[in-house]
Amino acid sequence: MSLVQFLVLGAFMFSLGVYGLLIRRNAVMVLLAIELMLNAVNLNLIAFEAALRTAFAGGQIFAIFVITVAAAEVGIGLAIVLLIFRNRRSANVDELDVMRW
Amino acid sequence: MVHATDGGWLAQWAWLIVVVPFLAMAVIVFFGKRMPRKGAEVAVAAMGFVFVYAAVLLILNITQGVIYEHSVQVAQIGSVSIEWGWVVDGLSTMMYFVVGTLSFLVFTYAIGYMKGDVRVTWFFAAFTFFAGSMLVLVSAPNLMQLIVGWEGVGLASYLLIGHYWEEKENSSAGMKAFYTNKIADIGLIIGAIVLGTAVGSFRYSDILDAAASNSSVLVPVAVLAGVLLFIGAMGKSAQFPFHVWLPDAMAGPTPVSSLMHAATMVTAGVYLIARMYPLYAGMASDMRVLIVIIGAITLLIAGLLAIVQDDLKRVLAYSTVSQLGYMVAALGAGGYTAGLFHLWTHAFFKGLLFLTAGSIIHAVHSNNMSDMGGLRKRMPVTFWSFTSASLALVAIIPFAGFFSKDEILATLGHSGYTWAMWIGILGAFITAFYMGRAMFLTFFGTYKGDAHVHESPAVMAVPMAILGVASLVAGWVNIPGVYEGFHHWVAVRAITFPSFASEGFDVPVMLTGLGFAIVGVIVAYVAYFRDADTQFARDRIRIPVLWPLLEHKYYLDDLYLAVLVNPIKGPIARAVNWTNSYIIDGIVNGAGVVARLVARFVYGDLDQKGIDLAVNTAAIVTGSAGEQTRRLQTGKVQQYAAMTVAGAVLLVIAIVIFT
């Protein structure tokens, strides 16, 4: 198992997340894509620590931080999506262009 | 150099003589209407002061001789120094006394004469202004101040002649006087400038010094200046051809005629020549023949004109012109004393003649002798005063005019102007004739009018009586061989000249003059006395060609009207008006139009289109840029995310490439 394989996987997952972020119409699906991106980053971090144990010693700890922040972020994100849905009866992000010129 | 003192404090304070009348004028102007006599009392008081001071100065000059002069610089214009001052010497004190005495008596008389007039306060203010200006004129130590006084009396003359301006002809008479004087003043002013610039100073002492010492700076201009100053004198002293204003000036109230146009103002020209005598006796003596000619012409033609007048005041006016001709002729012939002596006596008797004329006119309410007659019994004081003055004018011994006129005739004879002497003797006949005519038509015969005729009140009668006595005694101050006081009085001056001695009694000349005068009276008696109560008495003598010529005043007025007045009133005035309306106003309006066009261009094109365009364009560009830039803000989060990702990718690529 070499490091590159994990990094490629991580890149692939991150790309999928970016794709989903830009394309998906449903707000919940966008949040899902964001989670995917965060997980990809976690994978990168763990892979680097596994490969470079002495040079990069804080990878696991950093991953724990990321998970924590992701959890908080999801909580708030979903709360916002919920409120939008209550006001508009739709979670379509294409319709959320009130703050425009 | 004459033996004289400097006059002490009396001379140093002599400026009061000039200033007091002007102070009085100010008081009359501001407070006159509220006073019981409407300001007349202030005027008479001021003239009383002048009279007393002048009498004191005259006595000082008689006993000791006074030569004093003081000047104060008022302004400096380039190299010309403008000064104000006063002179006290023989000539000045004589003039102060004449002005002071006549002013005081005539002002007193005027209180009665002008009573009830609608403009009494104004009259006395103007009259006082006149007296002050006349004193400025005779007290001046330099030509500039003389001109100030000269113009001042000219203005006063205009104002007072036009006193009854409700009648157009009265104001026209005032204008005629002013214009005629003004034309002659051209000579005076240019003459003063010529002398002043040649010598470098306008003071008499400097100019006459240069004249007396035959200074080289005066050589080219002496005769010219003499002629020019004489032209100025001709205007003020009514010499031919500038005499036309004086008869018409009779439109003014009689006190004005008496004081100004008999005794004082018209003598200003004679005074000027006398003051400038070192010039006339020395360097400018070549032109004196002109003075004699003009004087002789004047005395003759004016005397003839007096014969045909019906208006009493006009007889006296022409008589004044004629007597001024005598004075001027005398000065021209070298008779400094003779001319001034006649000025002195003439002031008294001619001033009185006008006062009596005023008294008669006041009583009869008419100027014309055809409305008079038989007034001898009803107005005794007037009659006897008139008689005294007439005898003086006609030059019957021992009245005043005899001595002065005889001296003039003797001077003319002895200085080679025999033809002028014979004209003077003929003039004596004419004078006697017209005065006799005036007296007989006015006082004898029966009264032809219907007014209630009575003697004038005391305030008018007393001055007349005083002057009546003066007409008798004023000549006794210069009896050649007996008492030559006057000659010595007026010889007291700073700059003397080749002395012309007072003429002795030239018995043949004297008897001839006296004889002609008596013949004149007799002819007048024959012509007018016995038929004096006939309506046609005044036309009893009527020489065919001569009378119409005289009645039309030699057509001189018509000539002046046609040649001078109407061309200016008509074509020239219209041309000037046209030039003003179209050319000058055109230029001014054109400037306005151009300014407006320029403003319109600057506003419309430069400001609105040019500068505003630049400013607006900058704003528009900024606006458009903003307009376009805001389109980025779509509100769509996914789009923002897309742009972020794209930017991040570019950044990564850049880092990879450049490291």
Image (spheres, rainbow, N blue to C red):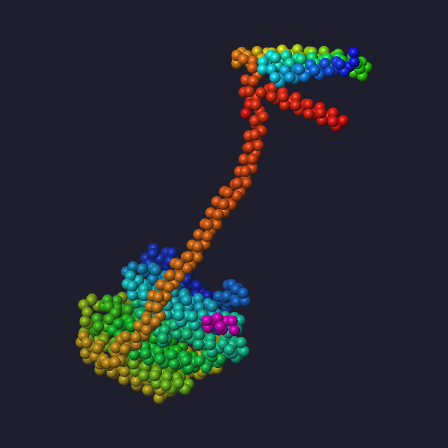
Residue B55: name its quadrant.
bottom left
Asked if residue B12 lies left or right of residue B648, the reply is: left
Q: Quadrant of the C terminus of chain B?
A: top right
Residue B627 image offset from top left, x and y in percent: 55, 30
In depth, the one of B550 and B410 nearer the eye is B550
Who's the residue at 37% across and 58% down the image?
B29
Q: Residue lying at the far right in this picture: please name it.
A: A54
| Figure check: B318 above or below B34 | below
Q: A62 or B645: nearer the eye?
A: B645
Span shown in magenta: B190-198
In the figure, residue B584 lies in which quadrant?
Answer: bottom left
The answer to which quarter of the image holds residue B362 is bottom left
Q: Is residue B481 above or below residue B104?
A: below
Q: Position of residue B267 (x, y in %)?
A: 39, 73
Depth order, front residue of B270/B487: B270
Q: Residue B72's x, y, as percent?
A: 51, 65
Query: Does B291 appear in magenta?
Result: no
User: Residue, x 32% and y 65% (percent of image)?
Assistant: B172
* Residue A91 seen in this snapshot: yes
Q: Position of residue B607 (x, y in %)?
A: 51, 44
